[in-house]
Amino acid sequence: MKILFVYLTVFLTYGSTNSQDWQFLGLENEGISNIAVDWSDPDIIYAGSGGDFTTGEVGSLIKTTNRGTTWDTLVTGISVTDIDINPKDHDMIFVCCGVNLLTVQGILKTTDAGLTWVWADSGMTITWEVGPTILEFSPNLDSIIYVAVSGAFPGNLYKSTNYGISWQAIGNNTYLRDGVATIAINPHNDNEIYCGTIMNGFHLRSSDQGNTWQTTNLSNVYSTVLYNGFNKYDTTKVFASGGGMTSAGLHYSTNHGNDWVRIAEYLPYTGGTNNIVFVKKGLDTKIFLLDSGLVFTGSDFNSLKLVDGISQFHPVKEFEIDTNSNRLYIVANGIFYSDIVAGTTEEEIKKENISYQEPVITIYPNPTKNNTTIKYKVFEYSNVNISIFDLQGRFIAKIVDDYKSKGIHEIHFNRYFSELNLSSGVYFLVYQNGKFLNSTKCLIIK
């Protein structure tokens, strides 16, 4: 039986500033290694620390609701390896608790923003030598979640289709048993997934939500794949980075991993690239990249420079971008933040965020029996895709795949009831129009 220790302790920040451009949010010497900023409220930040067997210290999950003025300890006696907030429900949070002889391994889940927690790892093989390290939500079908489990022995990749209530191993008889180090899901296509492994640097791709896997031509180039991911504004490229062997460094592919191009060869690469985040501002995109404990930024990979003042914090363990507050957060013996886009007004930020958060697809009436209308908004003339999936994330049919003009469009869903023979239940409608993505649930009653 797992024992869960939940506490409510308050930490006060020191209120100091390390430089003109960086603000200190506290938790100095707390061993913080993970943070997650609530996408609905930038004042709310979750932070996690790992256990240290040599000193006898255990890790904790900590939260602030006032942007670091005070911190509350939610759970202790764990070793946090990842914190993930549901992209559609900010009250649902998963925490990976990794391997440590002093702590309990498993996955914690809350549906009330941390007031109560339950263990949510039924179906996983977890021991004192193997535990969860990374969790990723499927971008548009949030009921689907993937978790990598690894440790002293090779682990596996697991998938849940019911918000973590139960899990199924999907890496059996594949190189994923090598130990998964990184997971990337195409923001525009939940079927397309890439994973990199720890032991031998295998890089694998799935085009059917993890049911089958193929190695890409980047496999065995790295000793470990440290990062792979997408630019959410342009998913024609998949990026990957790692260390070891003769061709270590950062690469991208435009043909699903068949061919790779190396870029940004001037980066240090002593520790490898661990994360890349793309931030859109108007027509421009800024790149933020963590490599060898330092954060770089630029408009493209040929112009990356160190973020101002970042050297004083080396090594940076993790960073996160919050576009709502226009801030870059870093973890380095405490938590710090700095503005990321100079000269941007609060009004400009609000307008940009509203455009991305505005609902673009609705269905009514909902629940429905047979007389249903789908209404969707097109922001710019481009190809529009609307597909229907079942609750387990299985693709059923494509309803719209055509170029549409800017404006509001409607289609009647009636004929799909008879053509698809849809039974009663919950379905997802996933909408894509250029860089805009949205999804909605539909309850069909017969």
Image: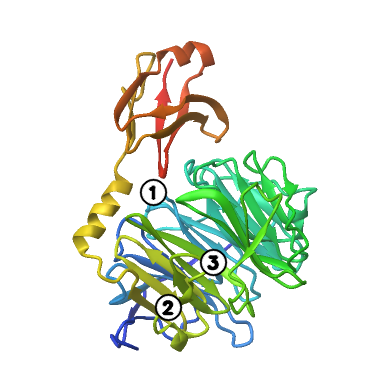
Label 2, secondary structure: give it. loop
For the point 40% across and 84% down, the residue is 309
Measured as percent of width and height from the top left, residue 139 is found at: 49, 46
Residue 349 lies left or right of residue 148; in this view the side is: left
The residue singled out by tag 2 in the image is 307
Q: CA distance from mark 3 to mark 2?
A: 15 Å
Question: Observer-nearest residue: 320 or 123?
Answer: 320
* Amino acid beneath label 3: Asn
Mark 3 → mark 1, Cα distance in angstroms: 24 Å
Label 2 neighbour load within 10 Å: few <14, some 14-19, many 20+? some
**Helix or strand or loop: what does disc 3 sit on?**
strand
Which quadrant would residue 444 be assigned to in this image?
Answer: top left
Q: x, y percentage for residue 44? A: 32, 65
Q: On the rendered structure, is 392 left or right of 211? A: left
Q: Whole-percent x and y of residue 2?
A: 59, 62
Using the image, determine if residue 48 lies above or below residue 143.
below
Mark found first going from the N terminus, 1 or 2: 1
Mark 1 residue element:
loop
Report the mark closest to the observer, 1 or 2: 2
Q: Which circle, 3 or 1, is nearer the viewer?
A: 3
Position of the C terminus by quadrant: top left
Residue wearing tag 1: 89
Q: Amino acid at mark 1?
A: Asp
Q: Which residue was labeled with disc 3?
A: 275
Q: Is residue 353 above or below residue 272?
A: above
What amino acid is at disc 2? Val
Quarter holding the N terminus is bottom right
Is residue 415 rendered to the left or right of residue 186?
left
- Residue 64 in view (yes/no): yes
